[in-house]
Image (spheres, rainbow, N blue to C red):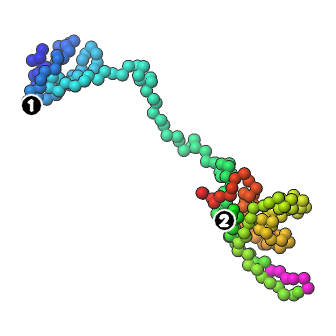
């Protein structure tokens, strides 16, 4: 039997024949692999005999972890910042160290005014609004006002008189008004205002 395994003729092994115990390999002897017809496993010939690998049992196959399939993009829900519990500021708003916000108007306006009894008209360019957090007195003024509460809240936040701020508000572009109200609303939210995307 050892002679049969040691030959290089690659002949067909008799049915049911298992390889003999390994012998010391000869110089120049190559490794050949065959299948045991009774056990269905692989073994090497005496040239290079290694440990025989048995097929995994059914229990081991069932216990093996299943491959993780990456989540499809359609299954991912993107939550807006307000639903994520954070108050994102508009792109044209800059958060200051003291918690106030400087809102740069995308479309600056010019307020034209005059003093009572005077014919001199002054022009005041408005390019930014410096908005501050509201305190209890501000909230009381807002709730007791019969005017537009959000405009009153914005005026108190900007620390500008209601009459003057109302005139500025009426001149502002709609996109700037929305950004203004977003900043004021962020002061009244649960979270601290943060820069958009940070």
Q: Name which residue lies at 53% across and 41% down.
A: 72
Q: State whether residue 85 is above or below residue 161.
A: above
Q: Nearest the camera: 80 or 87?
A: 87
SS state under label 2: loop
Report the Cα–Cα distance between label 2 and label 1: 81 Å
Residue 67 located left or right of residue 186: left
Q: Residues within 10 Å of mark 1 (few under 14, many from 20)?
A: few
In the rendered image, the residue lying farthest to the left is 27
Give the residue pinned by disc 1.
28
Q: Give the range drawn in magenta.
A: 112-117
Q: In this view, does 68 lie above or below 96?
A: above
The quadrant the N terminus occupies is top left
Residue sitting at x 72%, y 69%:
130
The residue nearer to you, when weighing 181 against 198, is 198
Residue at the location (68% across, 49% down)? 85
Tell me how many marks there are.
2
Q: Does the magenta stretch include residue 39?
A: no
Residue 79: x and y, percent?
A: 64, 48
| Quadrant of the drawing holding the C terminus | bottom right
* Displayed quadrant of residue 95: bottom right
Magenta segment's dominant SS is loop
Q: In which quarter of the image is residue 87?
A: bottom right
Which residue is painted at 84% across and 69% down in the image?
Answer: 162
> With 39 as the anchor, is 167 left or right in this view?
right
Residue 140 is situated, as x and y percent measured from the top left of the image, at 86, 59
Q: Identify the residue under disc 2.
A: 96
Whether 116 is among the magenta residues is yes
Whether residue 111 is visible? yes
């Amino acid at each position: 039997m050892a002679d049969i395994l040691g030959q290089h003729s690659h002949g067909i092994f008799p049915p049911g024949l298992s390889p003999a115990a390994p012998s010391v390999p000869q110089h120049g002897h190559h490794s050949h692999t065959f299948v045991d017809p009774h056990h269905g496993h692989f073994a090497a010939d005496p040239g290079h005999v290694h440990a025989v690998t048995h097929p995994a049992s059914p229990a081991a196959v069932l216990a093996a972890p299943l491959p993780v399939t990456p989540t499809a993009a359609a299954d991912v829900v993107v939550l807006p910042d307000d639903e994520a519990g954070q108050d994102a500021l508009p792109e044209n708003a800059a958060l200051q160290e003291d918690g106030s916000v400087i809102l740069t108007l995308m479309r600056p306006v010019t307020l034209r005014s005059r003093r009572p009894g005077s014919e001199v008209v002054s022009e005041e360019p408005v390019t930014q609004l410096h908005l501050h957090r509201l305190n209890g007195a501000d909230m009381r003024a807002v709730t007791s006002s019969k005017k537009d509460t959000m405009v009153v809240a914005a005026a108190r936040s900007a620390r500008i008189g209601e009459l003057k701020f109302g005139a500025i508000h009426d001149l502002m572009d709609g996109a700037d008004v929305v950004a203004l109200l977003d900043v004021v609303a962020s002061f009244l939210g649960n979270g601290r205002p943060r820069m958009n995307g940070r």
